[in-house]
């Protein structure tokens, strides 16, 4: 097409050699009378059969003149580049886009005008990545989109065609829109966990697929979790919410991150069909803060232990644990104890009575450890002296375990009441001691004095000792002290235990 065709009519001269030429097109009138035929700027209308006729006149002497002729034909095939005449979806011939429901099936039809036949393709070009749906060496091609999905099948489709005369491939487009509720875009996966340091900034981004698109920014609602409750976020000096031009992406920008910003976030978006929600979390990536308010619980300081408590600081975004160190004030080296993050009070045992100790602590996570707290000084209680029967000892013991001890001792003495009774005439030699005659010479007493009722007295002693083992450390010492005192009293047969 649009070129010039020159044709020479081949012949063999007759006799006489004078030859006449006539050109015909499609059995129409003559279009030329020379041996050469020139067709300039050939168009599609010039395609068809052409015929060349040659003839001469034979006029022998004495005979009637006779015309001699011969002819030949040829076909002119006018070729041209491929051109796509129509590309439609479900018969929508003149529409540049069609809207279908999700899960619906749609048929695409592409027709081309081409000589020779075109090579046609239908491709899914929805996400700047061609996906071939069909190919044919023909001037017509069709393809079906079955069970259309909003994420993968909504977008632009193309019909491409060309033949040997096309310098550039021909392309026709149609857009398929699929009505669907919002959902995360599979092509832009959200980063749901962001790791940041305090005073830095963070951007949470959410890209969706939806049709129709959300109306405006009000269709997106960003929220932040505060103390277990969700709070709606609005634009302010630290929080900024942005929306893309196509309304399919939203960003939440947070500047100068504070401790309470390391929490959960969510964004909810809706359109005319439905809605979806996406959650995010911003986590800190740093060592924990130093524990706060480390102090000694004075009421829980004993002869062998001290108790400290504290308030945990910021964990740095990771699980933390606490390390408590202690040592005698005069020592150089520290002893350390690791405790979990759920512990906020610790009793340090196996200490020496009446000794000054120092206690400090720090927090640690997988990233690093905090600074140490200021060391505290504490002195364990001194051991109570066993000399004498000071009223304070009796009062302390009586207040803590007096009720229980009185009952137990009373029961024990009642059980052995008969064993302490002296039979008539028995042990008369001890009456001087019983009557507290301290000036009686030892020679006037019996050598059996020391062994008098010792077995029964020992039984009473062991019962009191067993009771003391079930009490606290401080009370235990006091009971043992009482036990020794009352043992000697019992050995002198002065049965005063009943009244303690």
Image (spheres, rainbow, N blue to C red):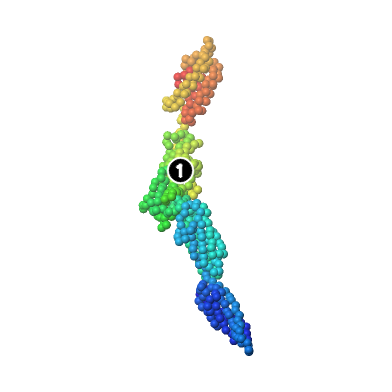
Question: On the rendered image, what quadrant is the C terminus found in?
Answer: top left
The x and y percentages for residue 16 are 62, 87
x 42%, y 40%: residue: 295
Can residue 289 be seen here? The reply is no
Residue extending furthest toward the left = 236
Q: Work out whether 224 lies above or below 30.
A: above
x 42%, y 54%: residue: 213
x 43%, y 38%: residue: 296
Q: Callout 1: 10 Å neighbours few (<14), some, many (20+)?
A: many
Residue extending furthest toward the bottom = 61
Residue that badge 1 annotates? 360
Q: Work out whether 316 lies above or below 33.
A: above
Q: Work out whether 248 lies above or below 471.
A: below
x 46%, y 51%: residue: 180
- In depth, the one of 216 and 334 nearer the eye is 216
User: Could you say whether the residue bearing mark 1 is in a helix, strand or loop?
Assistant: strand
Can residue 499 be seen here? The reply is yes
- In depth, the one of 102 and 27 nearer the eye is 27
- In depth, the one of 413 and 421 nearer the eye is 413
The x and y percentages for residue 297 are 43, 37
- In depth, the one of 366 and 254 nearer the eye is 254
The x and y percentages for residue 72 are 60, 77
The x and y percentages for residue 362 are 46, 45
Task: Judge left or right: residue 68 versus residue 396.
Answer: right
Q: How many marks?
A: 1
């Amino acid at each position: 097409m649009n070129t010039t065709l020159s044709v020479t009519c081949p012949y063999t001269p007759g006799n006489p050699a004078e030859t006449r030429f006539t050109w015909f097109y499609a059995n129409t009138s003559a279009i030329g009378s020379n041996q050469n035929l020139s067709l300039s700027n050939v168009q599609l209308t010039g395609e068809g059969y052409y015929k060349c006729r040659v003839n001469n006149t034979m006029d022998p002497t004495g005979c009637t003149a006779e015309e001699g002729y011969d002819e030949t034909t040829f076909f002119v095939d006018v070729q041209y580049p491929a051109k796509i005449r129509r590309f439609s979806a479900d018969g929508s011939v003149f529409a540049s886009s069609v809207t279908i429901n999700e899960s619906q099936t749609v048929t695409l039809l592409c027709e081309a005008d081409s000589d020779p036949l075109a090579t046609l393709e239908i491709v899914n070009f929805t996400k700047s990545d061609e996906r071939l749906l069909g190919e044919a060496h023909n001037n017509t091609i069709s393809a079906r989109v079955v069970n259309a999905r909003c994420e993968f099948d909504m977008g632009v489709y193309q019909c491409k065609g060309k033949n040997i005369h096309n310098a550039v491939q021909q392309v026709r487009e149609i857009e398929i829109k699929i009505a669907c509720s919002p959902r995360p875009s599979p092509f832009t996966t959200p980063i749901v966990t962001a790791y940041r340091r305090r005073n830095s900034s963070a951007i949470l981004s959410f890209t969706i697929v939806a049709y129709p698109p959300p109306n405006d920014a009000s269709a997106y609602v960003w929220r932040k979790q505060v103390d277990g409750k969700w709070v709606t976020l609005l634009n302010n000096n630290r929080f900024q919410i942005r929306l893309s031009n196509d309304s399919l992406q939203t960003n939440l920008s947070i500047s100068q991150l504070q401790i309470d910003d390391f929490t959960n976030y969510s964004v909810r978006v809706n359109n005319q069909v439905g809605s979806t929600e996406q959650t995010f979390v911003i986590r800190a990536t740093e060592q924990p803060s130093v524990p706060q308010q480390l102090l000694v619980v004075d009421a829980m300081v004993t002869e062998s232990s001290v108790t400290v408590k504290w308030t945990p600081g910021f964990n740095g975004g990771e699980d933390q644990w606490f390390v408590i160190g202690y040592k005698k004030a005069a020592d150089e080296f520290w002893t350390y104890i690791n405790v979990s993050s759920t512990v906020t009070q610790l009793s340090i045992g196996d200490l020496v009575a009446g000794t000054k100790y120092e206690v400090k602590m720090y927090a640690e996570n997988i990233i690093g450890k905090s600074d140490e707290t200021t060391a505290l000084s504490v002195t364990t209680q001194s051991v109570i002296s066993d000399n004498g029967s000071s009223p304070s000892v009796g009062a302390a013991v009586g207040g803590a375990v007096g009720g229980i001890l009185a009952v137990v001792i009373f029961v024990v003495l009642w059980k052995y009441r008969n064993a302490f009774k002296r039979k008539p005439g028995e042990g008369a030699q001890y009456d001087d001691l019983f009557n507290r005659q301290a000036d009686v010479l030892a020679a006037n007493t019996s050598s059996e004095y020391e062994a008098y009722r010792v077995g029964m007295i020992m039984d009473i002693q062991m019962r009191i000792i067993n009771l003391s083992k079930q009490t606290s450390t401080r009370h235990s010492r006091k009971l043992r002290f009482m036990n020794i005192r009352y043992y000697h009293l019992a050995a002198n047969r002065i049965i005063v235990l009943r009244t303690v």
